[in-house]
Image: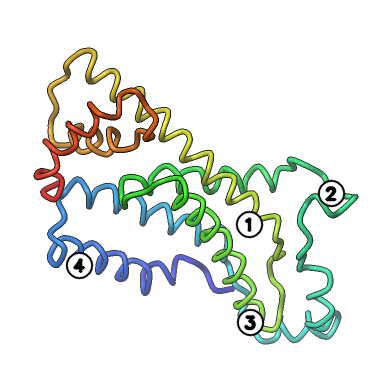
């Protein structure tokens, strides 16, 4: 079995450090941005570990499995392209489905501190992470000629749902945070200031407080790149 730990040390960790250095040295990002980016990269490593690893690479083991069930037969039983509403025997909210939702809640929450987002982008990125996971599982299965994980379109649906829930959590927390800061006239440090400016720009256009938020944003805009 190929474990994630070996890949983490030799591939993922150097890649993550390179991304952080690039954002610091080339894009001149501040330490608070790098803090959130580090958390996001650590979270992605967790996703990769629990969705793609361990990968069976032992040739004897793979040969033994293929003798009892050829690869093309595995494809029939371990790949599902039918959405949940088509299958009459579908069981809703099993443990696996709940875990797939929970898996992507942090994604929908944390990404707002890394890039500029809106609801359409969140929809796209939430779909993309689920689609990427299932696609990588498929590619790895084809490369080793063994469907070592069940590939299911419903996993994409539940991952997508988790991303949207995470974004909704973010919107609620951002609104509460801005209200508390404004109501009590809280003096910010660098960290709370970063969170504040990423919260006041998430109001919807129809919000009665939008004009106030826009004025705040333009007053603070010159400081955003420094954080």
Identify the residue at image location x=74%, y=86%: 63
Q: CA distance from mark 2 to mark 3?
A: 34 Å
Pair 2/3: label in front: 2
Q: Callout 4: 10 Å neighbours few (<14), some, many (20+)?
A: few
Asked if disc 1 and disc 3 are in contact, CB closer than 8 Å, the reply is no
Asked if disc 1 and disc 2 are in contact, CB closer than 8 Å, the reply is no
Comes first in the chain, label 2 or label 3: 3
Quarter of the image with the N terminus is bottom right
Q: Which residue is mark 1?
A: 156
- State the scheme by which the image is colored: rainbow
Q: Which residue is mark 2?
A: 90
Q: Which residue is mark 3?
A: 58
Comes first in the chain, label 2 or label 4: 4
Q: In the image, is 60 to the left or to the right of 167?
A: right
Q: CA distance from mark 1 to mark 3?
A: 29 Å
Q: CA distance from mark 3 to mark 4?
A: 37 Å
Q: Callout 1: 10 Å neighbours few (<14), some, many (20+)?
A: many
Identify the residue at image location x=52%, y=69%: 3
């Amino acid at each position: 079995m190929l474990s994630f730990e070996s890949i983490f040390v030799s591939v993922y960790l150097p890649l993550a450090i390179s991304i952080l250095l690039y954002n610091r040295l080339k894009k001149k990002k501040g330490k608070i941005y790098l803090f959130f980016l580090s958390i996001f990269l650590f979270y992605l490593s967790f996703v990769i570990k629990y969705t793609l690893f361990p990968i069976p690479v032992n040739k004897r083991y793979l040969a033994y499995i293929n003798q009892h069930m050829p690869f093309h037969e595995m494809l029939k039983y371990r790949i599902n392209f039918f959405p949940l509403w088509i299958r009459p025997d579908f069981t809703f909210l099993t443990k696996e489905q709940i875990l797939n939702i929970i898996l992507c809640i942090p994604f929908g929450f944390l990404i707002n501190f890394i890039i500029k987002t809106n609801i359409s982008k969140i929809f796209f990125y939430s779909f993309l992470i689920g689609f990427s996971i299932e696609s990588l599982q498929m590619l790895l299965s084809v490369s080793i000629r063994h469907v070592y994980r069940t590939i299911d379109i419903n996993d994409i649906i539940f991952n997508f749902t988790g991303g949207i829930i995470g974004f909704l959590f973010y919107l609620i927390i951002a609104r509460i945070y801005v209200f508390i800061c404004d109501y009590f006239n809280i003096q910010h440090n660098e960290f709370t200031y970063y969170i504040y400016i990423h919260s006041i720009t998430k109001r919807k256009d129809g919000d009665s407080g939008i004009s106030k938020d826009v004025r705040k944003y333009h007053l603070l805009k010159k400081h955003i790149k420094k954080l």
